[in-house]
């Protein structure tokens, strides 16, 4: 599962990336600082079951900090997008190809309107950030349309006269984007295109279909960055009016605090509402003044928003929950004795049997039942997992 950071140049995408991953990707105040994509690992936060169960956990694929489980998620920061990217303008081809396997997109927008359409610095409020939503939606839809439309005439004729399963065939053409057949079926329904005769599709039909497919397969949320700049606040509701999840962010503040925490200068965990200076004697007066400025931002905005974006992208936009598989439901351990070792991100609505298949196909094939380790209750194959469940899968292989 991968999150893609998207947006025009110079909105703070790479600062956001560095703040969420503690990487050192280059940052500068001019367009196209990012040429090659930056790939890293960030984390979503969930309450760890160790507190509820009274055990000391031993995470293997994640980490637990103060009773909060941090579950890793891949994140990619791609080159800035400009108008005409789907035709190769700017770094368009590189940008779009980097997004092929992203499950969701975080659109980093300059909420203060201090960068123009090309990503060049401009006076605060001189650019309407709502326009950035329109052009990004259009560019991604047109990119997807270009992939689907290639040799469409021959494809449509073959699908019609050979009576092929159109949803399956379209999904196959778009498999390089991580698109699944069920998503194609949903896009058919929402766009109202003629499934029986794809030869009749007009350009408008094609664009309408890929627009719905984009919404389904590459859902977008907005990180309204530079929200601390005067004038940004008035744009937040206008951005929300477009129907997206919008989180005000100050990526620069988050990066400063995480770097300071890394050096032991402050006590701060991502998502905290405040921070404490740990070693005042190690700070210069200039550094103290900078931290006090950050504290004023916290008083105005609350948390910097960076961690909230990651959490909401996974939990709300992708609708994923965290489940903990174990082999011993009494000790909450795996076969090696590790306590609450693994945290799995799975779609909400996943069943016990479906979860078994996610762990291993053989486990799914030989599934007998599952055990809710918290209640010690036996559950069947259709039991829908809940966020934070600890589950033991019982199969014929384990007998």
Image (cartoon, rainbow, N blue to C red):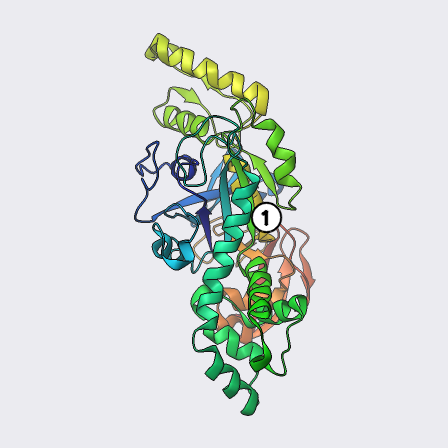
Front one among 40 and 385: 40
Residue 271 lies left or right of residue 281; in this view the side is right
The quadrant in which residue 85 appears is: bottom left
Residue at figure coordinates x 50%, y 87% from the top left: 158
Residue 371 lies left or right of residue 304; in this view the side is right
Residue 96 lies left or right of residue 322; in this view the side is left
Front one among 339 and 90: 90
When the figure is inspected, residue 329 is found, relative to residue 24, above or below; the finding is below
Quadrant into which the C terminus falls: bottom right
Residue at figure coordinates x 47%, y 30% from the top left: 114
* Percent coordinates x, y for residue 247 in the rendering: 58, 37
Mark 1 residue element: helix
* Percent coordinates x, y for residue 94 in the rendering: 34, 55
When the figure is inspected, residue 277 is found, relative to residue 62, above or below; the finding is above
Q: In this orientation, does residue 251 appear?
A: yes
Residue 31 lies left or right of residue 306; in this view the side is left
* Percent coordinates x, y for residue 108 in the rendering: 48, 40
The quadrant in which residue 278 appears is: top left
Front one among 131 and 28: 131
When the figure is inspected, residue 185 is found, relative to residue 84, above or below; the finding is below
* Percent coordinates x, y for residue 324 in the rendering: 55, 53
The residue labelled by disc 1 is: 315
Q: In this orientation, does residue 45 appear?
A: no
When the figure is inspected, residue 174 is found, relative to residue 251, above or below; the finding is below
Q: Residue furthest bottom?
A: 162
């Amino acid at each position: 599962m991968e999150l893609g950071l998207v947006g025009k140049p110079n909105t703070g995408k790479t600062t956001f990336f560095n703040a969420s991953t503690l990487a050192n990707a280059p940052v500068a105040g001019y367009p196209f600082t990012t040429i090659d994509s930056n790939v890293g690992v960030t984390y979503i936060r969930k309450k760890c079951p160790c507190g509820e169960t009274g055990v000391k956990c031993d995470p293997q694929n994640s980490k637990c900090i103060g009773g909060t489980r941090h579950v890793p998620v891949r994140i990619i920061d791609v080159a800035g997008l400009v108008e005409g990217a789907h035709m190769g303008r700017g770094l368009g081809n590189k940008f779009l190809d980097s997004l092929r396997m992203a499950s969701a997109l975080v659109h980093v927008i300059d909420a203060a309107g201090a960068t123009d359409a090309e990503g060049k610095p401009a006076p605060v409020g001189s650019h309407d950030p709502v326009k950035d939503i329109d052009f990004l939606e259009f560019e991604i839809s047109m990119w997807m349309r270009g992939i689907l439309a290639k040799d469409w005439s021959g494809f449509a004729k073959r699908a019609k006269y050979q009576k092929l399963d159109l949803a399956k065939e379209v999904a196959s053409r778009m498999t390089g984007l991580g698109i699944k057949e069920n998503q194609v079926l949903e896009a058919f329904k929402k766009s109202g295109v003629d499934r029986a005769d794809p030869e009749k599709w007009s350009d408008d039909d094609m664009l309408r279909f890929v627009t719905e497919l984009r919404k389904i397969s590459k859902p977008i949320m907005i990180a309204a960055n530079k929200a601390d700049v005067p004038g940004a606040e008035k744009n937040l509701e206008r951005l929300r009016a477009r129907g997206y999840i919008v989180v005000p962010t100050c990526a620069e503040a988050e990066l400063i605090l995480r770097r300071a925490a890394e050096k032991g200068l402050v006590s701060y965990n991502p998502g905290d509402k405040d921070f404490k200076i740990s070693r005042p004697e190690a700070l210069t007066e200039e550094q103290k003044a900078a931290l006090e400025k950050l504290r004023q931002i916290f008083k105005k905005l609350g948390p910097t928003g960076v961690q909230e974006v990651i959490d909401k992208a996974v939990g709300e936009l992708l609708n994923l929950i965290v489940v903990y598989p174990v082999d011993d439901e009494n000790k909450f351990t795996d076969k090696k004795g590790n306590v609450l070792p693994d945290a799995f991100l799975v779609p909400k609505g996943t069943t016990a049997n479906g979860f078994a298949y996610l762990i291993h196909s053989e486990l799914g094939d030989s599934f007998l039942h599952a055990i809710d380790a918290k209640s010690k209750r036996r559950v069947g194959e259709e039991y829908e997992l809940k966020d934070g469940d600890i589950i033991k899968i019982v199969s014929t292989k384990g007998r």
